[in-house]
Image: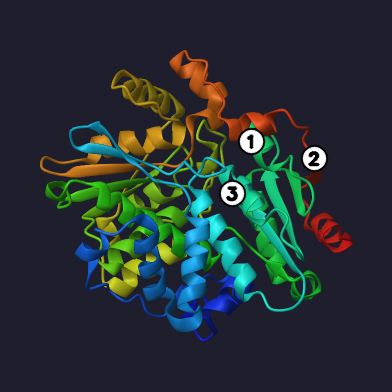
Amino acid sequence: MNLYNIKHPEQQVNFAQAVRQGLGKNQGLFFPEVIPPLDNVDALLELPLVERSQAILSALIGEELPSAVLNQIVSDAFTFPAPLVKVEDNIYALELFHGPTLAFKDFGGRFMARTLAAIRGEGKITILTATSGDTGAAVAHAFYGLDNIEVVILYPKGKISPLQEKLFCTLGGNIRTVAINGDFDDCQALVKQAFDDQDLRKAIGLNSANSINISRLLAQVCYYFEAVAQLPKAQRNNLVVSVPSGNFGNLTAGLIAKWLGLPIKRFIASTNANDTVPRYLKSGQWQPNATVATLSNAMDVSRPNNWPRVEEIFKRNGWNLSELHSDSRSDAATETALQAMQAKGYLCEPHGAIAYDTLSADLQAGETGIFLCTAHPAKFKESVDRILGLDLPLPQALDKHNKLPLLSDEMANDFSLLRTYLLQR
């Protein structure tokens, strides 16, 4: 599998190099040179999740990972389901929160950890990543206890839910967590600065586990196929998928699935008040505002890192960006959507509620809609309980960590401080 740097197409790497490096020159994102359309999509949809995912990832990655190795990685990573649940006659929820950290990031995090272990070579690796909530837990648990891999996770202090924080800031060992006095975009900027520091990269073997990393992104392609596989065949035509969007890696994976031949009519990029992309698609002007805190904190991103990949996909396929629908929702609208779903008998959380609400408004007669549920409602217990008048029980995975003390360090939004911190270990 050959990949190129979107900012500097002359920089070409293979899959293993892209996974180990994370980012290219000048913070450029790596993107596959070839996305091979699958000629057997209907047959693939008849297969179980693991077997189908092995075939999809083999087609994307090629022979760089031996079949036996890739198949074992997928078998070890995808050990939990992604059920499609009917909410209305023509609207379904794809539940991506049945993994160990109760969020969709478990698919990409577990696949990346096992892939990196298989291709790492010699020397120490330091994973540096930023999280707006769910990435941190998925990455921390996926890499916890691996030899010679140090993980440092930056997150915005006070801007993720308490249970999200507990899930990844209580592990210790090779997992270090740092609460940054800033927002997620500040955390992401610090990660990018670290990758631009060549001496630092070399000294600590720097890598990233955000959806910046191509291995995480490719793993996420697989659950879009799983969603369609569970739909009645009569509803697979005219399919619309609504994706709760923050850093836009999830949408990028869905677009790759469509490129491979999955029958998706269009996507909806659903955001909260951090609405850079909806405004851009309407005006043509890229004008990020200051990030604001919302109920759907994992989407509190004003400068989505994966947007260049989205534009690259549209350009490469000759698709028009007007085909991508996008809308935003306020916290008040999010609460109303949660209550509307509860009245229909479906329990959701703020991110999924936004995706459901934009889908409901966008869906046309004769279309079927799927919205992605990216996290377990209990991860947002405080807000969900308040909005819906509930007292949600904590799943065992959350309850266990909720009883442990936080082990995080705190740091100002200052790269020189982060650089010193990274070099100390």
Residue on which disc 1 sits: 159
Identify whether 63 is placed above or below 263. Answer: below
Task: Name the residue at the top extreme.
Answer: 389
Placement of the C terminus among the 4 image quadrants: bottom right
- So how many labels did they put on this image? 3
Residue visible at 53% across and 70% down?
29
Give the secondary structure at mark 2.
loop
Name the residue that disc number 2 marks.
Answer: 407
Q: Nearer the viewer, mark 1 or mark 3?
A: 3
Residue tagged 3: 138
Instruction: Residue 116: name its quadrant.
Output: bottom right
Circle 1 SS class: loop
Nearest the camera: 12 or 219? 219
Q: Give amino acid for label 2.
A: Leu
Residue 23 seen by the camera = no
Q: Which mark is residue 336?
A: none
Q: Is residue 198 left or right of residue 375?
A: right
**Callout 3 amino acid:** Ala
Q: Position of residue 126 (x, y in %)?
A: 74, 64
Identity, as a three-letter code, of the amino acid under mark 1? Lys
Q: CA–CA distance between discs 1 and 3? A: 18 Å
Cα separation, mark 3 vs mark 2, equals 17 Å
Residue displayed at 50% across by 66% down: 72
Within 10 Å of disc 3 (Cα), the crowding (few <14, some 14-19, many 20+) is many
200 to the left or right of 92: right
Tag 2 or tag 3, which sits nearer the N-term?
Answer: 3
